[in-house]
Amino acid sequence: MDYKKYIADRIEIDGVSADEIYSSLAFPPNTETGDYALPCFKFAKALRKSPVMIAQELKDRYKTDGVISEVSAVNGYLNFKVNKTALAAEVLGAVLSSGERYGASDAGNGKTVCIDYSSVNIAKPFHIGHLSTTVLGSALYKLFKYLGYNVVGINHLGDYGTQFGKLICAYKHWGDRQEVEKGGIHAINDLYVRFNNEADEAMESEAREYFRLIESGDKEANEIFEWFKKLTLDYVRGIYDKLGVNFDSYAGERFYSDKMQPVIDELRDKNLLKESEGAQIVDLEEYGMPPCLILRSDGATLYATRDLAAAYYRKKTYDFHKCLYVVAYQQNLHFRQIFKVLELMGNEWAKDLVHVSYGMVSLEDGAMSTRKGKVVWLEDVINKCIEKAHCIIEEKNPQLENKKEIAEKVGVGAVIFGALYNNKIKDIVFSYDKVLSFEGETSVYVQYTCARANSVLSKSGEFSGVPEGYSPNPQEFEVIKQLAAFPETLAESADKYEPSYIARYAVDLAQKFNKFYIDCKILTAEGDAKAFRLNLTKATLLTLKNALSLLGIGVPEKM
RNA sequence: GCGCCUGUAGCUCAGUAGGAUAGAGCAACGGCCUUCUAAGCCGUGUGUCGGGGGUUCGAAUCUCUCCAGGCGCACCA
């Protein structure tokens, strides 16, 4: 139920619309003061009365009922308290009847959202910097599905560029088939690093030739390339499986090789293409941006050219409602440029393209550098977190069954959660101390709360439904209010492309539940209190699991 | 130089289309397990909300300006 609307409909102020009252409604600092508040200051001038007086008069006129049980006027605020008994029954009913679908909606029915995320580069292992796009994109993927959208997850492979010529050149000089087969993507990456450190001019030119050979369809060059691609995809699928990440398309840059010409032709037809310093550009000076390069002076296409072709292809293929690009803020300008070019080409859907931009990761001693060996590999981080979880289990709960499975859920959860807990725009300085901290505002805390709830429920046996007319105490009510807020949290999270809202929600709910859990005995309570508390526990557990699962985090029964 | 982003407690960060005494976690210190999992709970302390102007009854939030840091700015992706 929309309480704000309910309240707004029952208040009349001369010369003030119901909409304005609705949007003026705010939240008091604490539950003792009230659940909703109307600040009356802004009405003072029009009514020529003091806010205190206005609040008092509105209070005198307002009729309380089964929904709003109490109204008070304090210092120019009109405070409302909802009927806690009714709200509690309504919320628990909603959560328990929806179960794993609580908070889900059909808002997205019939609409498709494309999400371009994670986007592996062939031959480059994931380092910690790839975590954000992967888990952000994955969380948005799950969230939009939950809200009823048709979602297309796209891994826009980085499989085009002169570096692949270098790679093949390095392999031909120094590589060994069996070693590469055994060492997988890291072995390939080592070859690439070696090339960058050791290649002379002769090798550089050889590399350009290999790149040309790939492009012209040379059999051997393409076989090697395809082999590297396979090793790369085998590697990343291992990581995606651990992180619970899915894709519907692996159409990468090469996929657009033959789809760029029509875009270039259209640009030319529409007189948007202009020669400058030998290159073909779209001039964006009018919009305060540097030109967007479409063709190099040697006629080769560029990153932007492929992105334009990809946008057209996605629109044609999926007819998206939104197309998201989950890419770090480094590329803010690039996306502003291609979105603008698509708009100038007359595509009204250019407004549906969204760059979901996020902050950068660095190490405590500065930026990462693969060449200098200053790099933290993602799989190492995941493995260390799982190991740490395993150690803690051995220490605290050694008789647990499925220790391995639990350690994995806990460890992987910590990695994902750590990357999603803060606003995505914030830069991250990676530190093992931080990801390996399993206390406080972490997924482990939330999972632990679930384990507690599970434990209580497993000991309770069968219990009846939500008792009617039960009036919740303050601790219980705080949990109820938090449960009630889940659907709107999801809506806001989707609206802002901000999974951190869900992560924070989960911690808030867990905190409120733990306070309740400590203060109110569940199993030894009697009658309605016991039934209510068991239902509250069940509803909390369901909602915490829903929240974490939207982030790609599993919840063990015990831990 | 120009553009975008960030600046809140010792550290990491919240702060809901301006609203009541600015909140969490970590770290520190002190409590709480013969009763539902102590990966937990309770308590203690800390703030020129980067500085300064402006708008407003009211500004961490809007605006201007300055400062600091990050990122980007033509043939890489």
Image (cartoon, coloured by chain):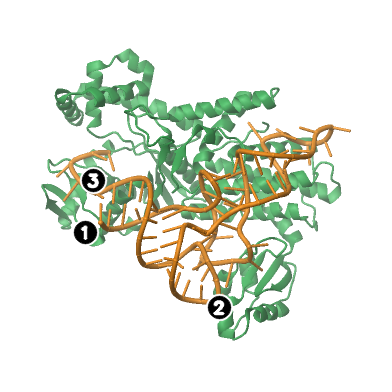
Chain colours: A green, B orange
Secondary structure of residue under mark 3: helix
Badge 1 marks a residue whose secondary structure is helix
Q: Residue at x 55, y 78 (%)?
A: A17
- Give yes or no for contact between labels 3 and 1 (Cβ–Cβ under 8 Å): no
Gap between marks 3 and 2, in whole Å?
50 Å
- Of mark 3 and mark 1, the one earlier in the sequence is 1
User: Which of A303/A448 is in front?
Assistant: A448
Q: CA distance from mark 3 to mark 1?
A: 19 Å
Give the crowd class for mark 1: few <14, some 14-19, many >=20 residues within 10 Å.
Answer: few
Q: Residue furthest left?
A: A278
For disc 2, the marked residue is A17
How many numbered circles does the render carry? Answer: 3
**Figure check: A362 above or below A224:** below
Which residue is disc 3 drawn over?
A305
Marked residue chain, label 1:
A
Question: Badge 2: few (under 14), some or many (20 or more) residues near its Cα, within 10 Å?
Answer: few
Distance of label 1 from label 2 (alpha carbons): 44 Å
Amino acid tagged 3: Thr
Q: Residue at x 21, y 28 (%)?
A: A214
Which chain's residue wears label 2?
A: A
The C terminus of chain A: image quadrant: top right
Q: Judge by depth and name the residue closer to the eye, A281 or A543.
A: A281
User: Quick one: SS at disc 2?
Assistant: loop
Query: Which amino acid is tagged 1?
Result: Glu
Q: Are marks 3 and 1 on the same chain?
A: yes
Write down the residue under mark 1. A285
Residue farthest along the right direction in this orientation: A526
The numbered dot on residue A227 is none
- 1 and 2 marks in contact (CB < 8 Å): no
Is A257 placed left or right of A519 in the picture? Answer: left
The residue at 74%/71% (across/down) is: A65
**Amino acid on which disc 2 is placed:** Ser
